[in-house]
Amino acid sequence: MVATAGRQAGQYSLVRRAAECAGTASGGWRAAQVWLGFAAQFSARSGRSARPFHRGPRRRRGRPPSRTLTAALAGRASALRILGRAAEAAGDAHRSLALARQIGDPAGELQALAELSFQAYYAGHHDEAVRLAWQAGQITAGIPGATARYCSYV
């Protein structure tokens, strides 16, 4: 999920209410946690944005990885990077990338590569940041417009 701060800022409470309505064992609740994390990132609650990503999707024993899980890992990586927790952020971004590639999730792969690009940029590894951003830009099939625009930004 990618959106602008202005459009997301007012959505946090709406997404939070939707998450409260879903049963905690449901896929809907897990997906709502991912959306809640992204909504928090683009609102005044950005410091709390990692929490929903921790509460939301977890890979359960016997269940295959999902697009929700790859999005949660990429989102949590972004939140942790913003909080200055670079090592944890890198771990989540690499896990997100591996899972996205494993399940054939091009949007998840793009999000993970974009996050890794940001991490490389902030660490001062500009050549690596450009390489990762270019790699993300090569993923075009099956990518929603908002995600493609996000990649252009990266």
Image (cartoon, rainbow, N blue to C red):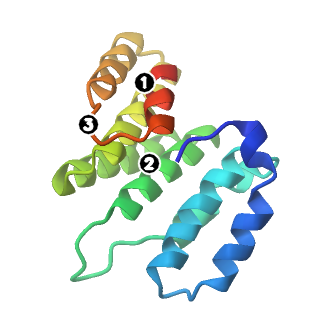
Residue 151 falls left or right of residue 16: left
**Mark earlier in primary sequence (1, 3):** 1
Q: Residue furthest top?
A: 127
Q: Nearer the viewer, mark 2 or mark 3?
A: 3
Q: Which mark is residue 92?
A: none
**Mark earlier in primary sequence (2, 3):** 2
User: Of helix, strand and loop, which one carries label 2?
Assistant: helix
The residue drawn where x is 32% and y is 28% is 136
Q: Nearer the viewer, residue 137 or 79?
A: 137
* Distance in Å between CA atoms under marks 1 and 3: 25 Å
* Distance in Å between CA atoms under marks 2 and 3: 19 Å
Q: Nearer the viewer, mark 1 or mark 3?
A: 3
User: Of helix, strand and loop, which one carries label 1?
Assistant: helix
Q: Position of residue 63 (x, y in %)?
A: 25, 79
Q: Position of residue 144 (x, y in %)?
A: 42, 41
- Whether residue 148 is situated above or below residue 112 in the rendered picture: above
Judge the density around disc 2: few (<14), some (14-19), many (≥20) Cα neighbours within 10 Å. Answer: many
Report which residue position mark 3 lands on: 141
Which image quarter: residue 49? bottom right
- Whether residue 33 is situated above or below residue 87 in the rendered picture: below
Q: Amino acid at mark 2?
A: Ala
The residue drawn where x is 20% and y is 57% is 103
Judge the density around disc 1: few (<14), some (14-19), many (≥20) Cα neighbours within 10 Å. Answer: many
Which image quarter: residue 18? bottom right
User: Of helix, strand and loop, which one carries label 3?
Assistant: loop
Which image quarter: residue 68? bottom left
Q: Which mark is residue 74?
A: 2
Q: Amino acid at mark 3?
A: Ala
